[in-house]
Image (spheres, rainbow, N blue to C red):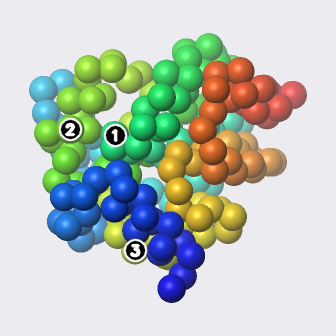
């Protein structure tokens, strides 16, 4: 069995038993789910991939996370702090939720609202992870959390949890 598939199955089994039984099929276009004041954009990978390849003058910090992933939740405030600290310095933080589609309205959107996330939050709904994981990074096993930091000249992928000072140090390397 492919190691990526095994890693993802282990994460899904460990993190959320019931949710893994009902993965939805991937959307054919960008969908928007609105609940109260929050408007969640849901992408399949083909639509989402542009977020990994911008060539403008910005630095992109793309974090892959899920509400069922404890290390992901622990580090989210650090991404929010980076988003606020570097907002005037062309740093764009994108939080990519890998939550299960059936949980968007009852878990993901309430989580975003409760924690008042200011970074851009997208949901990636594409169950064909064996195809898209290596497109994010050849070195990614599929484990969460994972982060891609890039600009038009440089890319760095991290399959790890961050503490604030570590994350800040990595972002600052792109500011030089």
Q: Are marks 2 and 1 in contact (CB under 8 Å)?
A: yes
Give how far apart the Cα atoms at labels 3 and 1 are. 20 Å
Question: First in sequence: mark 3 or mark 2?
Answer: 2
Question: In the image, residue 108 lies at what x, y percent?
Answer: 26, 38
Judged from the image, the secondary structure of the residue bearing numbered disc 2 is helix
- Disc with the residue nearer the chain's start (2 vs 1): 1
Q: Left or right: 8 with respect to 3?
A: left
Residue 136 lies, in percent from the top left, at 59, 61
Q: Label 3 vs label 2: CA separation?
A: 23 Å
Q: Residues within 10 Å of mark 3 (few under 14, many from 20)?
A: few
Q: Residue at x 41, y 22 (%)?
A: 118
- The circle drawn on residue 128 is 3
| Residue at image point 14% right, 39% down | 106
Residue identifier under label 2: 107
Which image quadrant for residue 48?
A: bottom left
The image quarter in which residue 45 lies: bottom left
- Spot the residue most to the right: 176
Where is mark 1, residue-wise? 67
Q: Secondary structure at mark 1?
A: loop
Judge from the rendering whether residue 63 lies leftward or rightward of residue 162; answer left or right. Answer: left
């Amino acid at each position: 069995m492919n190691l990526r598939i095994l890693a993802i199955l282990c994460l899904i089994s460990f993190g959320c038993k019931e949710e893994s039984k009902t993965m939805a099929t991937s959307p054919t276009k960008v969908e928007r789910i609105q609940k109260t004041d929050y408007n969640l954009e849901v992408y399949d990978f083909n639509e989402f991939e542009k977020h990994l390849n911008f060539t403008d003058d910005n630095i992109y910090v793309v974090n892959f996370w899920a509400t069922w992933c404890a290390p992901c939740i622990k580090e989210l405030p650090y991404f929010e702090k980076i988003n606020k600290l570097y907002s005037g310095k062309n740093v764009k933080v994108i939080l990519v939720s890998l939550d299960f589609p059936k949980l968007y309205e009852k878990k993901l959107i309430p989580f975003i609202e409760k924690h008042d996330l200011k970074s851009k939050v997208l949901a990636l709904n594409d169950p064909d992870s064996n195809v898209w994981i290596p497109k994010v990074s050849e070195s990614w096993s599929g484990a969460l959390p994972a982060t891609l930091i890039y600009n038009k000249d440089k890319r760095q992928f991290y399959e790890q949890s961050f503490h604030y000072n570590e994350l800040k140090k990595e972002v600052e390397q792109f500011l030089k």
